[in-house]
Image: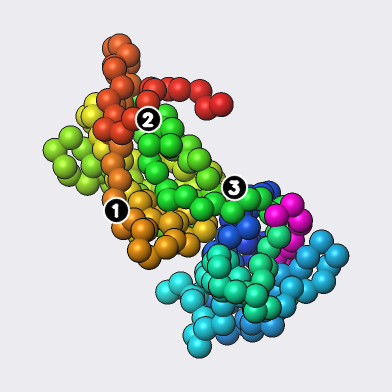
Amino acid sequence: MRTKTFPEMLISISPQAKVLPANTLRFYIHFPRPGEAHFERDQLCLLDDKEQVVRDPFLVLSQELWSPDGRRLTVLMEPGRIKRGLGADPTHEPALFVGRTFSLAVTALGQTTRHTFRVGDPVLEAVEETRWRLVAPTLGSRNPVVVHFDRVMDAVLCEDEIGVLNASGEVVQTSVSLAPDGTTAQIIPRHPWSALEHHLVASERLEDVCGNRLGEVLDHDLSTGGRPRAGTISFTCHDVQGIDTPRNSSTTPVYPDETPV
């Protein structure tokens, strides 16, 4: 009997947004199997719109940032090429220029993968949960809470640093999945929603792709900058017996079964 074989999954890069801020701090390289033993730093490069290699765009560390299973590599952009006001040294020139197109390319495991994106304006404001828009689920269903962000968020930190509590303060078992473009998350419960009122909680470690946190901008004046903080938004599941009034501890409205725009 012939054993059926399947092609190996491809290496992927996130975020997959078509437009990324000029001060993007972090990329992730996802490998279909442990890739640490098969990867060298010179297999990763940033190319400009003329297919020229950008010189020294990444932060060089003594040890690469691999996930415990060896399938995800965290790539940090050189902070000196992101932060403002560091002087005219060439090493402080921006790696990403607004309005231009760049490609992040990686070759490993016999594959070459690249993500091409256009560079938008830098994001120089702290994350604010009052700017998010939530679509509440239906009571008794396993429909996700859908969160629409106002910017591209960090996928791994969204998965780890966003959770849900019920009205009694007990943790609701959920999983968080960020869309490839990084602007929408689905929070999926392990069990059907069993109460009307819940609280979405984001920890002070949550970041966007530029390293900005709730209450704190990465690139800020230390004498005036805010401090990282947690954020909470309350939402009410939609009761199939009738539409409930949304309840939100922030100023952002939360509408049951709202159709995203």
Residue at image position (45%, 22%) is 258
Query: Main SS of the magenta segment?
Result: strand
- Please, what is the three-letter code of the amino acid marked with disc 1? Arg
* Cα–Cα span, label 1 and label 2: 18 Å
Q: Residue furthest top?
A: 242
The magenta stretch is 98-108
Residue at image position (50%, 88%) is 62
Residue at image position (70%, 55%) is 98
Q: What secondary structure is marked by label 2? A: loop
* The stretch drawn in magenta includes residue 136: no
* Cα–Cα span, label 1 and label 3: 25 Å
112 relative to 170 in the view: left or right: right
196 relative to 156 in the view: left or right: left
* Cα–Cα span, label 2 and label 3: 22 Å
**Mark 2 highlights which residue?**
252
Q: What secondary structure is marked by label 1? A: loop
Q: Is residue 191 shown to the viewer in this render?
A: no
> Which badge, 1 or 2, comes first in the chain's sequence?
1
**Mark 1 highlights which residue?**
229
**Mark 3 highlights which residue?**
181
On the rendered image, what quadrant is the C terminus found in?
top right
On the rendered image, what quadrant is the N terminus found in?
bottom right
Give x and y (percent) for residue 220. 44, 61
